[in-house]
Amino acid sequence: MIPMEQRTLGRTGRDVSVVGQGTWQLGGDWGDVAEGDAFDVLDAAVDSGVTFFDTADVYGDGRSEQLIGRYLENRPDADVFVATKMGRRADQVPENYTLDNFRAWNDRSRANLGTDTLDLVQLHCPPSGVYSSDTVYDALDTLVAEERIAAYAVSVETCAEALTAIARPGVASVQIILNPFRLKPLDEVLPAAVAAGVGIIARVPLASGLLSGKYTEDTVFGPDDHRTYNRHGEAFDQGETFSGIDYATGVAAAAAFAELAPEGATPAQTALRWIIQQPGVTSVIPGARSVEQARANAAAAALPPLPQATLDAVRELYDRSIRAEVHGRW
């Protein structure tokens, strides 16, 4: 296994790799991935130094969790911290965020992952009112006391939701969309997290693949790929697909971003390196559907920090091409 930089994940007290492995792709919504191929991807990530997997109980209706559980059973040498999510298995109203539902969802995730105690459970982008509910946090504290979960956290869509959660003393970490096309969290969320000792997990780091520079306006995605069916938020929050950016706008901006990649680094690795060096970020969780992608993502951790000129160029590109479209929305 190749060593990778580790950072403490907020109030969990656990160290995780600065590049983690997102596993939405292994469950569904990006096209089919065979079980053997999924295990190969996880193997490549672990052997490249990844010690952090992120999943959710709704990825493939539990398939992602089940794959991780079977994989870790077969790889007892892999010291991996697993974060899952809950909350999307019911209608999205605050009334469904109850202790009884939490227990039921936890029981399902514990069975899927083959563990008695879940390392970290994140509320999965619930309605905004949930983040300020005392009853919800009391229920989460109960799950910790019952040893169903070791720690809890939140996954958010907006900066306001993140700030509300960070103020809660039991919240270990916040998962938020952060990439060179989504800079708003840099202004308030990351500084607040640092001050509170809360970890930051950066998701959608490549803007659903846009920042890889591989796509053109003529690229066609499969009908079971969320990049086809959720471009305008038809199935879930629009920000989860291409970071909420109009596709044509994103393709043009991605071409400009690709020109900023240093010698020896791909545009995707440059985007991951940019995220890693933002103050307050604990781990970034790109997905992968192939061994090559998993290895390339992990290799971004070993790149030297981007120079200030590149950081300035990213900000200028965002202000020129992206800000007007998305900054106010999120």
Image: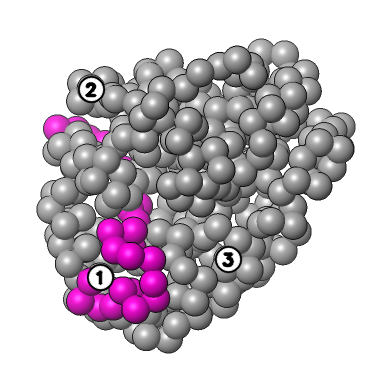
Q: Secondary structure at mark 3?
A: helix
Q: Secondary structure at mark 2?
A: loop
Q: Secondary structure at mark 1?
A: helix
What's under tag 1, amino acid-wise? Phe
The picture places residue 27, in percent across and down from the top left corner, at 29, 37
Q: Please, is residue 4 above or below residue 151 in the view? A: above
What's under tag 2, amino acid-wise? Ala
Q: What scheme was used to colour the molecule?
A: one colour
Using the rendered view, name the quadrant where residue 244 is placed: top right
Q: Which residues are magenta?
A: 74-101
Q: Going from the N terminus, do you reach mark 3 or mark 2 first?
A: 2
Quick check: can you spot residue 7?
Answer: no
Using the rendered view, name the quadrant where residue 218 is placed: top right
User: Residue at 60% of width from left, 23% of height from top?
Assistant: 212
Are the residues flagged by discs 2 and 1 in contact, CB closer than 8 Å?
no
Using the rendered view, name the quadrant where residue 207 is placed: top right
Judging depth in this view, the residue of 211 and 83 nearest the camera is: 211
Q: Going from the N terminus, do you reach mark 2 or mark 1 first?
A: 2
Q: Please, is residue 175 above or below residue 74 in the view? A: below
Residue neighbourhood size for the residue with mark 2, other residues' Cα within 10 Å, grouped as few (<14), some (14–19), many (≥20): few
Residue position for label 3 = 162
Residue neighbourhood size for the residue with mark 3, other residues' Cα within 10 Å, grouped as few (<14), some (14–19), many (≥20): many
Q: Please, is residue 252 above or below residue 147 in the view? A: above
User: Residue at 37% of width from left, 85% of height from top?
Assistant: 135
Residue position for label 1 = 102
Residue position for label 2 = 34
Q: Is residue 105 magenta?
A: no
Q: Going from the N terminus, do you reach mark 3 or mark 1 first?
A: 1
What's under tag 3, amino acid-wise? Ala
Q: Please, is residue 188 above or below residue 37 in the view? A: below
